[in-house]
Image: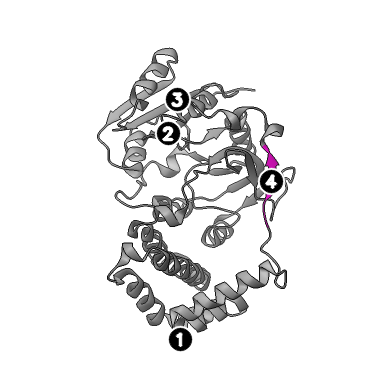
Amino acid sequence: MLQQDLVSIVVPIYKVEKYLNRCIETIVNQTYKNIEIILIDDGSPDNCGAMADEYAQLDSRIIVIHKKNGGLSDARNIGMKYVTGDFTIFVDSDDWLDKNMIEEMVNISRKHKADVVQSAFYYAYKDYLLFDDRYYKKDDPPIILGNKALMAELVVNERIKNFAWGKLYKTKIIKDIPFKKGVLFEDVFWAHNVMHLVNTYVIVHQPLYFYLQRSDSIVSTYTHRNLDILEGLKERHYFIEEYYPELTIESYKVILRNSLIHYNLLLMNSKKDKSSLHKRKIQAYIKDHYNEFQIAVKGDKQLEQQLRLFAIHPYFNICLLFVWKVLRKCKMLSKPIGLERINVKTKGDLINEEAS
């Protein structure tokens, strides 16, 4: 195939010495060769910077930028200043790509004149992969969405994730939209601004991206900074109210669901919220928007129950979750639909390439 379109691949790097070789190897060995690889060493204290420089000496397509640590958003923003490609892909430096990913996605973009192409992905664990087959199968034909359908799916965050990675963007769409610095879940603050400009969005169901799942649990690593996601969802909500008012109710539903989750996580990490400041803030927000939440959860029996009990007292909601857990364990309540599990031995050697 002709490979006249240049694809820029932006890879922020920080403390991933164990995984970096695998990531870069799967990029340089893509079947699509007309690429520029922008590696941003975000002040990594390990050997990542030197490793990136070594790759740059071996491959002229690689550009390495060394900078003081400023976080993922800052690294991506710096990387975008060096992008010259027609298309841009973001790759997290502990993840990796199928060798055909870029070729497949460029072909799809050309065929459908798409502004953004989204690839399916694997949740990659040490010994297995998970694939979300609840909505689509791997051999299903691509789905083509216009702007309104795209924004509706983005708000729900099921078929279309807020992740910046795993997508091929026309560079002109994203070049003037920086990531918000100093926050976690920066993609939530960014994605809706990008998708607002998209006319044609294509979903490819073949999993071409491997999203590494670290062993640390969210409970053990949880801090108040995880609450940035709530701020991102609220910021997006104001945007939705202005440009897509028909999605306001669904947006409230997503905010409520995430608020309940993070209230529970704060309870499980009480030492990190000793004054209960963050729990009170969540509780106050739910109280202030209770009427809107009531409308949003109508028809969702479980979320209706949670909201009602939380309004009486947050601990009542905790009790309800415990009861549901017991009922599922006793098989008196159906478990949520799971994901397809794939034995790593059937997926080649990449998943087993844990660096020493």
Tell me the distance, in whole angstroms, between the alpha carbons under discs 2 and 3: 9 Å
* N-terminal-most mark, 3 or 4: 3
Q: Can residue 192 be seen?
A: no
> Helix, strand, or loop for circle 3?
strand
Tell me the distance, in whole angstroms, between the alpha carbons under discs 1 and 3: 56 Å
Q: Can residue 142 be seen?
A: yes
Tag 1: amino acid? Ile
| Residue corresponding to mark 1 | 312
Mark 4 and mark 3 in contact (Cβ < 8 Å)?
no
* N-terminal-most mark, 2 or 1: 2
* N-terminal-most mark, 4 or 1: 1
Mark 3 and mark 1 in contact (Cβ < 8 Å)?
no
Observer-nearest residue: 114 or 186?
186
Q: Which mark is residue 170?
A: none
Q: Predominant secondary structure in magenta? A: strand
* N-terminal-most mark, 1 or 3: 3
Tag in front: 2 or 1: 1
| Residue corresponding to mark 4 | 341
Residue at 42% in and 15% down: 60
Tag in front: 1 or 3: 1
Observer-nearest residue: 29 or 260?
260
Tag in front: 2 or 3: 2
**What span is colored magenta in the figure?**
338-343
Tell me the distance, in whole angstroms, between the alpha carbons under discs 4 and 1: 40 Å
x then y, percent, for residue 222: 39, 56
| Residue corresponding to mark 3 | 36
Mark 1 and mark 2 in contact (Cβ < 8 Å)?
no
Bin the neighbour count of mark 4 within 10 Å (Cα to Cα): few under 14, some 14-19, many 20 and up: some
Tag 2: amino acid? Val
| Residue corresponding to mark 2 | 10
Tell me the distance, in whole angstroms, between the alpha carbons under discs 3 and 4: 34 Å
